[in-house]
């Protein structure tokens, strides 16, 4: 079983912004943190802060922190990436929603995910399935898809 979409996460509050943050595995950190910072990662239980404006990307109970600017996905985070696996930004999906073109985009992502062809665990800085982001965006904008 892939833990891509169904893993149970523990939660922690971000020490900087107070956001609720979910736990993330070391493999995600190794693929997210840029060189050379990835050479000196300390193995620990980390949490990812999803707040775009918060400078902290990962933090651990032991007090290790990694800034968002050290992430390979930093630009994507600033661009409100919706799906890190297939390079879809929130704005692109929102305009598709308005044009009633969103269904095939989401269906594509769902199919790829079900086929195990997504890469959320390493592409998405949260280590979580990108489909969560689609649901959140749809809820935020109260749209029927
Ligand atoms: Zn934060």
Image: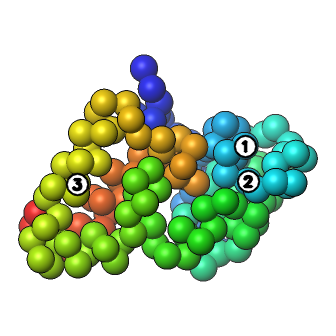
Report the residue marked by disc 1: 30
Q: Is residue 97 left or right of residue 58?
A: left
Residue 24 versus residue 101 in the image, above or below: above
**What residue appears at the point 11 percent right and 63 percent down from the top-left corner?**
145
**What residue appears at the point 43 percent right and 60 percent down from the top-left corner?**
87
Which of the marked residues, 2 or 3, is nearer the chain's N terminus?
2
Q: Residues within 10 Å of mark 2 (few under 14, many from 20)?
A: many
Specify the farthest residue to the right.
40
Colour scheme used in the picture? rainbow
Disc 1 is placed on an element classified as helix
Report the residue marked by disc 3: 106
Disc 2 is placed on an element classified as loop
Q: Quick check: marks 2 and 3 in contact, CB under 8 Å?
A: no
Specify whether residue 133 is in view: yes
Residue 85 versus residue 96 in the image, above or below: above
Where is residue 113 drawn, in percent x and y?
A: 33, 38
Where is residue 53 drawn, in percent x and y?
A: 60, 79
Report the front residue among 138 and 96.
Answer: 96
Instruction: Kindly report the distance in space between the C-alpha atoms of the residues bearing marks 2 and 3.
Output: 28 Å
Q: Quick check: marks 1 and 2 in contact, CB under 8 Å?
A: yes
Instruction: Kindly report the distance in space between the C-alpha atoms of the residues bearing marks 3 and 1.
Output: 28 Å
Q: Residues within 10 Å of mark 3 (few under 14, many from 20)?
A: some
Report the residue marked by disc 2: 33
- The mark found on residue 61 in the picture is none
């Amino acid at each position: 079983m892939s833990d891509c979409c169904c893993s149970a996460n523990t939660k922690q509050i971000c020490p900087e912004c107070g956001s609720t943050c979910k736990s993330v595995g070391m493999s995600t950190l190794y693929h997210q943190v840029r060189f050379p910072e990835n050479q000196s990662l300390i193995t620990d239980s980390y949490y990812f802060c999803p707040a775009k404006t918060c400078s902290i990307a990962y933090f651990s109970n032991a007090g290790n922190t990694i800034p968002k600017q050290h992430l390979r996905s930093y630009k994507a985070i600033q661009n409100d990436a919706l799906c890190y696996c297939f390079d879809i930004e929130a704005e692109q999906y929102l305009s598709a929603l308005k044009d009633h073109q969103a269904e095939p985009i989401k269906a594509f992502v769902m199919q790829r995910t079900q086929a195990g062809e997504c890469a959320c665990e390493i592409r998405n800085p949260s280590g979580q399935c990108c489909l969560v982001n689609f649901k959140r965006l749809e809820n935020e904008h109260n749209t029927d898809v």
